[in-house]
Amino acid sequence: MSKFTIKIIIFTIMAIFVSGSFFIIPAKAQAAPQTLESYLEYFYNRYAKHLDEHGLIFKAPGYGVDDFIAADTARGILSLAAYYKYRALNGEDAARVKIKEAILAANNEMNSRNYNTQSFSDAWAQMAMVSLLDQVPFLLSADEQHQIYSQILDRMEAGIIAPDTSNRAALSAVYWQHTLNMLYHKNLVSHERKFELDKLIYKKIKTVLDKDVDQSGWYKEGTPMRFNPHYHLITAFAFLSYGEITGDVEFYMTAKKMTQNLRAITFDNGMIEARIDARPVGLGARSACRAGSPVLSWRSPFEQEVWF
C-alpha cells in the first residue's frame, strides 16, 4: 500500500474520530499483527453486523442524539452505510445495495437544501461519495455517476466558502481538496477552474493557520484563546494532509512542529495533563491514537514504538 493511500486511510480514521466514534481493540483482535487495512476491515465488518441486526440507526448522546434514530443528513447516511464497504468489496450484493442507496439518498438530501447551508460535514460526505464510487466500482450507471459528480461540482464553491469553526474549516478544506483532485483527475474540471477553487481552499485553511496557530506552533481557541489538545491534533493532521496533497511545505512543516509540541507535553502512555486543556474531556486512548497518527509521517522508529 502506498504512502499516499496510508495517509488517506488514516485521515479517514481521523474523520471518524471527529464524528464522535471511538474504537477499542478487543484482546482477540490483538492476537496477531494486523495491517492498517485489515484493522479497518475488522471494525467495519463488526459495525456492519450490528447494523444488520438493528438497522441503519445510531445515537450520539454527546451530540444531543439520546435515542436511536435513522440518519437524516448526508454525513449520517453515508457514515452508516460506509461500514459495508469491505463486504461490498468482497462481492456481497446486499452490501453494495446499501452503499448505492446511501450515496443516492445523501446526494438527494444535499440537493434539497440551498448551497449556502453546507458545512464541513457536507464536505466530508461529498468526498466520501466520490471515494466510495471509486473504491466500489459499478455501483451506479455511468449516467447516474456523472450526474452526481456534476452536482458535487455545482455545490463545491459554495461549500468551500461556507463558514466553519476554525478546526472544522481546516478539515473542510482538506476534504474539498481531496474531492477536487479526484474530480480533476477524471477530467471533469478544467485547469482554470481547478486553479480558482484551489485558491479558495487555500484561503480557507490559511485563515486557520494565521488566526488559530501561533508562531510557536500551538493551536488555541475561544476567548481568551486557550490550548486544546484534541483540536490541536485534528488541525495538525489537517495541515499534514493538505501539505502532502498540495506540496505546500508551510503546512507540512507546521504540522510537524505542532506534533512535536504535543509530544513534548505528553506522558509516555499518551496521556496529557487534563488541567492544561481548555475542554478536559475525551482524553485518553482516543487522544493517544490521534496523537500517534502524525508520527507515521516523521518516520522515527523510537517515536512510533512509543505511540503504537
Image (cartoon, helix red, strand yellow):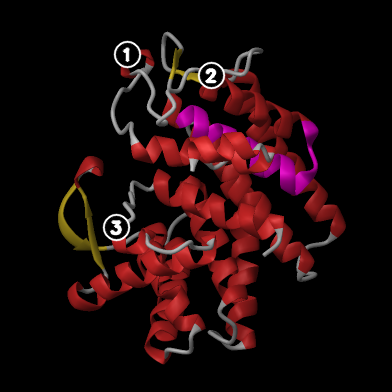
* Residue nearest the viewer, comparing 200 with 294: 294
Counting from the top left corner in percent of width and height, residue 125 is at: 49, 59
Q: Measuring 76% from the left and 40% from the top, which residue is drawn there?
A: 199
- The disc label shown at residue 26, or none: 3
Magenta segment? 231-249
Q: Nearer the viewer, mark 3 or mark 1?
A: 3
Of the numbered discs in the image, which one, if any, rests on residue 275?
A: 1
Q: Earlier in the sequence, mark 3 or mark 2?
A: 3
Residue lying at 37% horizontally and 64% vertically, measured from the top left: 43
Disc 2 + disc 1, Cβ < 8 Å = no
Look at the picture and state if 295 lies above or below 275.
below
- Please provide percent x and percent y for residue 142: 64, 86
Q: Is residue 294 above or below residue 261?
A: below
Of badges 2 and 1, nearer the viewer stands: 2
The overriding secondary structure of the stretch rendered in magenta is helix
User: Quick check: marks 3 and 1 in contact, CB under 8 Å?
Assistant: no
Label 3 crowd (10 A; few <14 / some 14-19 / many >=20):
few
Residue 187: which quarter of the image? Answer: bottom right
Query: Which amino acid lies under the numbered mark 1 shown in the image of this protein?
Result: Arg
Give the residue at mark 2: 264
Disc on res. 238: none
Is the C-beta separation of discs 3 and 2 under 8 Å? no
Q: Dot 2: what SS?
A: helix
Q: CA distance from mark 3 to mark 1?
A: 30 Å
Q: Amino acid at mark 2?
A: Ala
Provide the secondary structure element on which disc 3 rests: loop
